[in-house]
């Protein structure tokens, strides 16, 4: 499981002209990708890492500040581009495998007390964000 995590002052996800997820205060935008070999056992460690990641101002985390997270599924994080000019998606999990794992990470975050907004799995989404810093890291479990 792989996530690109950006510290943001605000972020939103729009599907067909409708805002489906939004954070209007400082927090984290999480683009979450699922690998073909990932299992449900990785959901809890990923949620813990995201919630406790000390990348907010003054080395704080969402756990310590109550800052929100906007989690957006992103299969393209496993696009392979080493050969040729067209990415290969063979490492990305199929939707029927990935969707429950993305949901599991979101559920684990919420069970930890995190305030979580989401995109819509499989939809064509417009993701808007105002990066803070910019500060962006790659998280893998």
Image (spheres, rainbow, N blue to C red):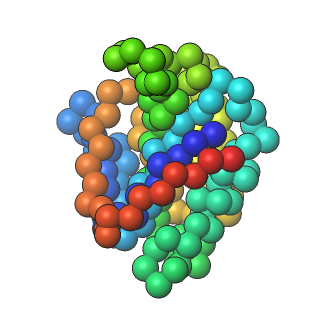
Name the one closer to the observer, 110 or 11.
11
Q: Is residue 54 left or right of residue 126?
A: right
- Which residue extends farthest right? 41
Residue 75 in view here? no
Number of marks in the rendered image:
0
Q: Is residue 37 left or right of residue 15?
A: right
Residue 135 point in image, percent of width and height: 38, 64
- At 37% from the left edge and 48% from the top edge, which residue is drawn? 21
- At 65% from the left edge and 24% from the top edge, which residue is drawn? 36
Name the one closer to the observer, 11 or 55.
55
- At 32% from the left edge and 27% from the top edge, which residue is drawn? 124
Q: Is residue 34 depicted above or below 58 in this figure?
A: above
Residue 56 point in image, percent of width and height: 46, 74
- At 37% from the left edge and 70% from the top edge, which residue is drawn? 26
- Considering the image in quadrants, where does the N terminus appear? top right
Q: Is residue 137 left or right of residue 49?
A: left
Residue 119 point in image, percent of width and height: 41, 41
Residue 53 point in image, percent of width and height: 58, 67
- Which residue extends farthest bottom? 58
- Which residue extends farthest front? 83
Residue 129 in view here? yes
């Amino acid at each position: 499981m792989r996530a690109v995590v950006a510290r943001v002052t605000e972020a939103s996800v729009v599907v067909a002209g409708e805002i489906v997820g939004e954070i209007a205060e400082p927090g984290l935008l999480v683009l979450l990708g699922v690998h073909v070999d990932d299992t449900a056992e990785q959901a809890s460690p990923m949620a813990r890492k995201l919630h406790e990641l000390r990348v907010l101002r003054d080395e704080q985390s969402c756990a310590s500040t109550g800052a929100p997270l906007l989690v957006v599924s992103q299969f393209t994080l496993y696009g392979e581009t080493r050969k040729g000019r067209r990415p290969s998606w063979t490492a990305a999990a199929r939707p029927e495998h990935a969707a429950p794992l993305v949901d599991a990470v979101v559920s684990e975050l919420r069970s930890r007390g995190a305030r979580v907004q989401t995109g819509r799995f499989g939809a064509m989404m417009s993701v808007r964000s105002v990066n803070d810093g910019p500060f962006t890291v790659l998280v893998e479990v």
